[in-house]
Amino acid sequence: MSLVPIRRAILSIAAILVLASGAHAELGGPVSSVKVDGGRMGARMASLSMRGYARHDLTRGNGGLVHEFSNASGQVFAVTWSGPGKPDLRTVLGKYFGPYQASAGGGVGRVRHALRRPAQVDQADLQIQTAGHMGWFHGVAYIPSLAPAGFSTADLPVQP
């Protein structure tokens, strides 16, 4: 028996898994894959059409909530989360995880008490605010340039 067909099958399955794991509705990414995000989190999903945008509610197994907001073009322009434990922020923030991580890391001269502050990103086209305490976390990530006309950050729940 030849190992070539088995090896091909294993490589094909591995390629499918790698490609599937790369698709998720990250901040700034396509809304078409919100279901993948929900699957990764083991979350129940519901979507609601709003004026000029859609809100996708993901209820995680631990009771935590993640809301992903998509514009009419199908791009995720905002994400909010709250609950026990943080969702996988690398997945949720996508390419914006780097600036978030840099804001959380601080620098050599950072004062000791400042290390306890939550990470914040305040850039022209990227806003991320996080907060929480032992056992409960919440946050908001928002890309103003992708938001629909007339959208206000007041429309984003501080604690969804």
Image (cartoon, rainbow, N blue to C red):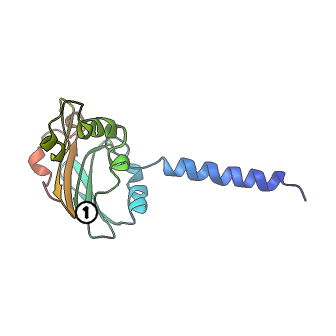
Q: Position of residue 127 (x, y in %)?
A: 19, 38
Q: Residue at x 50, y 51 (%)?
A: 21
Q: Secondary structure at mark 1?
A: strand
Q: Residue at x 36, y 37 (%)?
A: 95
Q: Position of residue 104 (x, y in %)?
A: 24, 41
Q: Position of residue 123 (x, y in %)?
A: 19, 31
Q: Position of residue 27 (x, y in %)?
A: 31, 43
Q: Which of these two is toward me, 82 or 43? A: 82
Q: Quadrant of the C terminus?
A: bottom left
Left or right: 6 as drawn, with respect to 55: right
Counting labels gives 1
Name the image quarter holding residue 149.
Answer: top left
Q: Residue at x 43, y 56 (%)?
A: 36
Q: Amino acid at mark 1?
A: Leu
Which residue sits furthest left?
154
Left or right: 98 as drawn, with respect to 142: right
Q: Which of these two is toward me, 74 or 62? A: 62
**Around disc 1, counting alpha carbons within 10 Å, would you say few (fewer than 14), some (14 to 19), or many (20 or more)?**
many
Q: Quadrant of the N terminus?
A: bottom right
Residue 151 is at least partly visible in this image: no
Name the image quarter holding residue 67.
Answer: bottom left
Name the image quarter holding residue 34.
Answer: bottom left
Residue matched to label 1: 65
Q: Is residue 125 above or below residue 20?
A: above
Residue 77 is at least partly visible in this image: yes
Which residue sits furthest right?
1
Q: Residue at x 36, y 47 (%)?
A: 90
